[in-house]
Image (cartoon, rainbow, N blue to C red):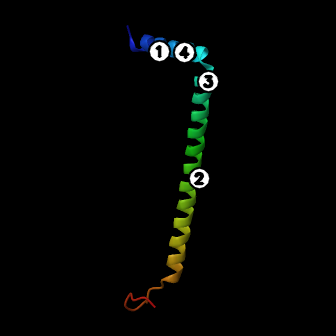
Amino acid sequence: MGALEEGGKVATGTVEALKKNPIALALVVINLTFLLAFAFMLREISQAVERKDELLSELAKRCVVLSPNKGDRQ
């Protein structure tokens, strides 16, 4: 048997098991919803951190002025 046929059998068996036990299906759906929500939240947090880092970098560039003569800070 090929891998495709085996995958089909596993999928069919899973669907049949979930038909017999709907609470398991509900738990799977809820877990997937939580995973998607956390993934979205982590993406938003990482974007906010990137924006903060850019702002801090820009602020640091404005605060530190190099002397034209020796490269010393003023």
Local secondary structure at mark 1: helix
Mark-to-mark CA distance, 3 and 1: 20 Å
Mark number, residue 23:
3
Residue 1 is situated, as x and y percent measured from the top left of the image, at: 37, 7
Q: Which residue is mark 2?
A: 44
Q: Left of 16 or right of it: where is 1?
A: left
Q: In the image, residue 2 lies at what x, y percent?
A: 38, 11
Residue 49 lies left or right of residue 70; in this view the side is right
Q: Amino acid at mark 4?
A: Ala
Q: CA distance from mark 2 to mark 4?
A: 36 Å
Compared with 28, 38 (above or below) is below
Q: Amino acid at mark 1?
A: Val
Kindly identify which residue carries mark 1: 10
Does label 3 or label 2 sit earlier along the sequence? 3
Looking at the image, tell me whether mark 2 or mark 4 is earlier in sequence order: 4
How many discs appear?
4
